[in-house]
Image (tube, rainbow, N blue to C red):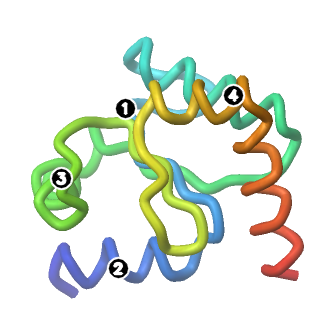
Amino acid sequence: MDVEALIKQQIAENTVLLYMKGTPQFPQCGFSARTVEALMQLGEPFAYVNILENPDIRSTLPKMANWPTFPQLWVKGELIGGCDIVLEMTQKGELATLVKEAGQKAE
């Protein structure tokens, strides 16, 4: 499977997916850490891909998504954005609504 097909499959199979540096337990950058913290506060499950262990995904996804940086949060196949957007949505209560609705539709 080529890298683009793998990324498309990951996005399709995971309702809430975070491409990040490190893991939720051990984030490898501050932006990933803050994004994970915002997601974990919601109490909803989410999948993640550690791009540091996947250099092909790390180099391919920014071109596919037209988004140059990590982390990248995807919900229901749509790119939501990076750390700043996630934190802004968290403060407004928008992220909780989006993630909870996505989880309900997945069941």
**In the rendering, at what x and y percent does residue 20 appear?**
41, 38
Looking at the rendered structure, which numbered label has been put on residue 62?
3
Q: Amino acid at mark 4?
A: Ala
Separation of disc 3 and disc 4 at Cα? 22 Å
Question: Which amino acid, by three-letter code, is at mark 3?
Answer: Pro
Residue type for callout 1: Lys
Dot label at residue 8: 2
Residue at left offset 24%, top offset 36%: 69
Image coordinates of residue 68 in percent, x first then y, are 17, 42
Looking at the picture, how far across and down is residue 11, in whole percent?
46, 72
The residue that disc 1 covers is 21
Question: Along the horizontal axis of the image, is 28 left or right of 54?
Answer: right
The x, y position of residue 56, in whole percent, is 14, 57
How far apart are the alpha carbons under marks 3 and 1? 14 Å
Farthest front residue in view: 92
Secondary structure, mark 3, is helix
Q: Which residue is mark 4?
A: 38
Residue under the point 20% across and 48% down: 58
Residue beneath the point at 44% across and 51% down: 49
Q: Earlier in the sequence, mark 2 or mark 1?
A: 2
